[in-house]
Amino acid sequence: MTISAIPPAFIFIAGGLLLPFLKLKRAKQIFQLLIPTIAFIDLLFMGQGTYWTYHFLGYELIMGRVDKLSLCFGYVFVIIAFIGMVYALHVEEAGQHVAAFLYIGSTMGVVFAGDLFTLYVFWEIMAVTSVFLIWYRKDKKALDAGFRYIMVHIFGGCCLLAGIIMHIADTGSIYFNLIDLNGPGSKFILLGFIINAAVPPFHAWLADAYPEGTITGSVFLTAFTTKSAVYVLLRGFPGAEILIWLGAIMAVYGVVFAVIENDIRRLLSYHIISQVGYMITGVGLGTALAMNGASAHAFCHILYKALLFMGAGAVIYVTGRRKMTDLQGRNLYRQMPVTLILYLIGAFSISAVPLFSGFVSKTMVIAAAAETNNALIFLMLHLASIGTFFCLTLKLTNGTWFGKNTEGNGEEKIEGAREAPLNMLIAMGLAAFACVFIGVYPQVLYHILPYPVDYQPYTTHNVVNTLQLLLFAAAAFWLYIDKLGGKHTITLDTDWFYRIPGRLFLSFCKKPLNTFRSNVQDLLSKNRAFVASLSKNPFTIPSVLAESMRLKTTSVTDRERKEEISVRLNKLKSITYNENRYRISIGWSVMGCIGFVSVFAFIFFCL
Amino acid sequence: MAKILKIVFFICIGSLVLIGLLLHDAHARFWWEQIPDFDAIFGFLGCVLIVFASKALGHYWLQRNEDYYDD
């Protein structure tokens, strides 16, 4: 049966290209849901092995390397594609769906790519198609953020390409598997990967662009780019020690920035960075438990983060407001109770509350850190867990649905706020169900992980410790609850380094450089006739210039000399170019050539 | 309602501390895991630390007006 499977990337890409030809709204919607379903069935039919290999310029391109690792990511990508499409059913603009399908398809291409060339091609398609999910929001902020997003990803893509070329030159093979971290090639590949994984200091594109995406598009964005980067890191760089530290720093960094954020989707974006930090640490630790933990956490994270983004998106869709300062104290929980409950399931999952999905995956990574005796890493990951619970379950919930109105405008409810459309709620319900299901019955997830799992999350100790950690964080929150509302500010991040100098460069071009250009242009256009006369005969240019200078420097009183010079000048100017006059014998040319060749030979052979 | 919630919360916290005192971790890898109720202390102090560290960072350095990047 395995022969009949087709590349899942192809299903999504073909689906995306066919979608605009469907005219009926209902047909379009059915088609949107049909594509991920077909892809899922396709995955079920794909046995492990290598498929779809092509010979190209002496290399072997592999479109389908199917093993447990790629299948694990493949499954969750297809599931979230389906949920995201349900969430986006009400969007009528076909372009958005086309972009989403091409984006999903290229991510599937990355996941099943067995060689670096195929990987690179899909990697770039992923960057180019995903930016449309931001641009479709169509306001200036989104356009600008999209441009910055695509610039960073093009830079990352260039690093990856440079690394791949060097790697191929070194090893002679384009097969993508474990890459030794020595030599510049592997380092550039790693750099390309970690830019997509949003590892600080290359993370600012994420918090910059994801909150500006369309409400439905951002749900897709949260799932694919960073997690496909985690996948390629798991494949290429397991056990790279630098990743342990980068990951732990990331986990804490994201939390710290999330605490002071006001925009609800930007707050969630910082938590993507934080959560991906756990996965990166898992990749760096490189043990079977850590690799399983990273994969499992990616799986769970995709589901609950999409759920959280869907919840925040629903609030923005209904109210048109995206900042906590505009939402808190308006008692939104009365108008959107279902959204609140579904959102809370996502928040509990990301906070690793027992019986929710984050608990069964995050504790795996932390256990792996303990198992390898990384004390500081262990504490940093715990600290990030506390911050996650604090930000998402407490602060964001309070700031969006409850809280106090600090604006002083006395607004007690948001006019027209109601539950989100049914398709949005269904999508959130599906994701919430998956979160709880995995949390209660983790074996279903552990079964598809890349290595055999010998880990039990629900030990008394694990549960009690986690609950202590979380509830005491809640106690601390309770103490400071009044000081934790949003503020009308934005937070500077490393995107400052390209936004502000970029603007300075632009104003340098606009003002000083442009003035210089117009001065030069003025000068030349004023003396156009003179400059044109020079072109009559290139050979007399030096003497014409010299004579004109002499004419200018001669004092006005010395009239006789002035006249003499101008007569000479006119004479010079009247000489037109005549090829016979300046011709030299061919012998000179030959001698020149021989001279050049001997110098060249001397340099080539003797030095 | 808020009052009931508060009471339930304190009961939960209290019982967790008690259970924590009774538990002994045989698989502890780090010395601090031998301290009873370490996670409770760490949870509370960690949360305070994160809040103060990020608020301070934001207040003195990173937080700017919303029109900071506008032309």
Image (cartoon, helix red, strand yellow):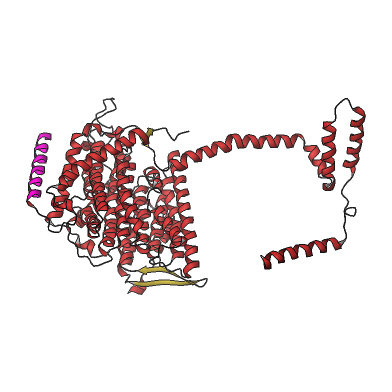
Q: Position of residue A574 (x, y in %)?
A: 89, 42
Residue A387, above or below A598: above
Assess whether residue B19 is covered by the magenta stretch.
yes
The prevailing secondary structure element of the residues shown in magenta is helix
Magenta span covers which residues?
Answer: B1-21
Residue drawn at x 16%, y 44% as measured from the top left? B41
Give A409 or A197, whichever is nearer the viewer.
Answer: A197
Q: Position of residue A388 (x, y in %)?
A: 25, 45
Question: In the rendered image, which quarter contains the N terminus of chain A?
Answer: bottom left
Left or right placement of residue A359 versus residue A199 in this view: left
Q: Position of residue A493 (x, y in %)?
A: 39, 41
Q: Position of residue A99 (x, y in %)?
A: 42, 53
Residue drawn at x 46%, y 40% as measured from the top left? A499
Residue drawn at x 41%, y 46% as measured from the top left? A134
Question: Where on the picture, by quarter, is residue A264?
Answer: top left
Residue at the extreme front = A606
Residue A38, above or below B33: below
